[in-house]
Structures are given as C-alpha cells and as structure tokens.
Amino acid sequence: MKPKRTILCVDDNEQSLSIRKVMLETRGYRVLAYTDANLALERFAQGGVDLVLTDLIMPGIDGSKLIEGVKGLSPETPAILLSGKVKIYERETGADVFLAKGMYAPAELLERIRLLLVRKRGPKRAQPRVHAQAPPAHHVASA
C-alpha cells in the first residue's frame, strides 16, 4: 500500500477544522490539524508535510503569511488558501489555489488537493522494461 500523504490543515475555527480533518482522513490522508498558525509553521519546519490547507483570516499570522513562511522553507510544497472573504484575494497570497468558503463543493476541494499532490510528485516516469530476451524482430516470410 502506498504511504499516506500528509496535509497540514490550519483554521482558527475548530468546527471547520474538525470537518475538514474528518473529510480528508476518510479519503486516506494523514491530517495534522492546527488552530494556531505559529504552531502549524513550527510543525511544518519539522518536515514530512505534502500539502498545506489554510484559512486566510486568523488571529496572529494569517493564512497568506503562513503560506509565505511555508514557501520560504519549501517552495515546492503546494498550498491551498480558503477564505470567506473573496475580495481579499485581490492581494498576492502565494497560494497555489484559492477557494472561497461556501463557493466550492467538498469534491472540488478533494480534486484540487489530488491534482496538486500529483503535480508535486511529478509525472510518473515510464520505466524501461527489462526483458530476459530481446523481443523477436518482425520478419517478412519469404515465399
């Protein structure tokens, strides 16, 4: 079985965080859930996180500052920013994907996560097949 992908999920709203955590865990992801962006960034620095999913508006460090910190440590780690305030996205956030809360279906969020994780891993390389013997060459039978 392939190892579980780890998602760092951050939201100061414990109910939203809990719902997202359950949704992701039932899809086979390992979820590190944090209500505090400072603690989440400290945990991210320890490594092993495949994707960051964060709320934008939070006390202390907001989601865009959290993503800035994540990208500073690991530019290739994909990040999804969620917000109830659509207008706020007019400023640069550094997120790979921005989703307005209530404007997307859970299936859309799961698909975005899947696509970002595939992109992070890169396309699967075709492995050259090693044969015990060379395949027979095509011969034209002479009559």
Image: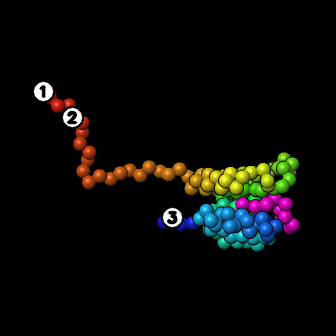
Q: Quadrant of residue 57?
A: bottom right
Evaluate whether residue 116 shows in this view: no
Q: Which residue is mark 1?
A: 143
Residue found 81% across the figure and 59% down from its top? 56
Residue found 26% across the figure and 45% down from its top? 135
Q: Which residues are magenta?
A: 53-66
**Which of the labelled discs sits on residue 128, or is there none?**
none
The nearer-to-camera label among 1 and 2 is 1
Image quarter (top left, top right, bottom left or bottom right) of the C terminus: top left
* Helix, strand or loop status at disc 1: loop
Q: Residues within 10 Å of mark 1 (few under 14, many from 20)?
A: few
* Helix, strand or loop status at disc 2: loop
Q: CA distance from mark 1 to mark 2?
A: 12 Å
Q: Which residue is mark 2?
A: 139
Q: Give the residue furthest to the left.
A: 143
Q: Which residue is mark 3?
A: 2
Viewed as shown, does residue 106 lie left or right of 141? right
